[in-house]
Amino acid sequence: MRLHRIALGALVAATLALTGCGATKDQGSGGAASSGGGAPATGLQYMVPNSPGGGYDTTARTAAQVMEKEKITGSVQVFNLPGAGGTVGLQRVVNEKGNGKLAMQMGLGVVGAAYTQKSQAKLSETTPIAKLIEEAGAIVVPSDSPYQDITSLVAAWKKDPKSLAVGGGSSPGGPDHLLPMRLADAAGIDPKTVSYVSYDGGGELLPAILGKKIAFGASGFGEFLDQVEAGDVKILAVTSAERVAALPDVPTLKESGIDLEFTNWRGVVAPPGISDADKQVWIDAFTKMHDSQAWKDELEKRGWVDAFATGDEFGAFIADQDKRVADVLTTLGLA
């Protein structure tokens, strides 16, 4: 079945020792954030389940910086635990049952990787905290690539799909894999002929693009803004319905004659079995962050689309995404 007929549209949608599993509510000297005020939350740890420099890493560190700057929390310890498309981190979160001080950055990539990596840990076991953002994808090449527009790239790709490798910062089933598969399908290329190379996050994808180990990359556009400004890479097209403010000169795929839109999302989950009070600490912290001008400024700066939802609402969204991804990957023979 061709991918545009598959229900993919809804998708557009140093290990550190952890310090105990106690509650983060105010127990005297160190306090927790709450919707009604009080002392900042303290002792929070924020895991990124892939390598530094990627979209999850950027999102987590930006969120932590805003929470600290706005005195919503004390110092937030952000750390990376890469491996297996994010499922090493997912297993760690599930293993930390009851640890109310830990949360993990995640998104569509972890949903897919849980299936393709045959993870024993499931997202359904985690505690949903907040959906933060959505972000358009981008097709990116080194600045001196022979393909200086999406039309010439796709034309060469159609001639010999296997000769032009595409890289992404997620495992099969993640957004960076689904994007080129859908792009191929929209361009009249059999997705089964696409040579896809998986990297563990944008931090590993970027050197592959710059080193010309792949012909082009597919990932969230926000991961390449610094390199675009430095003149190291060129984004040929974005996958949103309209051009993004951060890249006003870059056309959408639709503007370039390719009938495709695709959006990724990112959110935060915590371990299973945490107390209601600890869950509320995290939700309150992200809610206050979301409402701050500093976060709004980061959204504008990075071209992220606000997609904020918390708790049960986010949990229902994850459950829906999980089912749809499972259906798609089963159809493609990847789950």
Image (cartoon, helix red, strand yellow):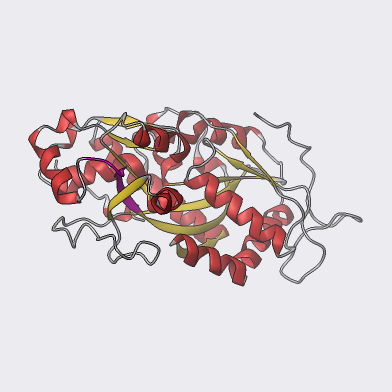
Q: Main secondary structure of the magenta part?
A: strand
Q: Quadrant of residue 135?
A: bottom left
Residue in the foreground of this view, choosing between 156 and 137: 156
Residue 236 in magenta? no
Q: Quadrant of residue 246?
A: bottom left
| Apparent side of residue 169 relative to residue 106 in the rendered image (left or right) | left
Residue 138 in magenta? yes
| Apparent side of residue 274 relative to residue 246 in the rendered image (left or right) | right
Whole-percent x and y of residue 16? 70, 32
The answer, for residue 189, to whether it is visible in the render is: no
Residue in the foreground of this view, choosing between 54 and 306: 54
Q: Which residues are magenta?
A: 137-145
Residue at the spot 44% in from the left edge and 35% down from the top edge: 114
Residue at the spot 25% in from the left edge and 57% down from the top edge: 261
Whole-percent x and y of residue 280? 69, 59
| Apparent side of residue 75 relative to residue 228 in the rendered image (left or right) | right
| Apparent side of residue 68 relative to residue 92 in the rendered image (left or right) | right
The N terminus - image quarter: top left
Residue at the spot 66% in from the left edge and 29% down from the top edge: 15
Q: Quadrant of residue 65?
A: bottom right
Whole-percent x and y of residue 165? 24, 31
The answer, for residue 98, to whether it is visible in the render is: yes
The C terminus - image quarter: top left
Residue in the foreground of this view, choosing between 62 and 289: 62
Residue in the foreground of this view, choosing between 222 and 15: 222
Whole-percent x and y of residue 302? 47, 60
Residue at the spot 28% in from the left edge and 56% down from the top edge: 239
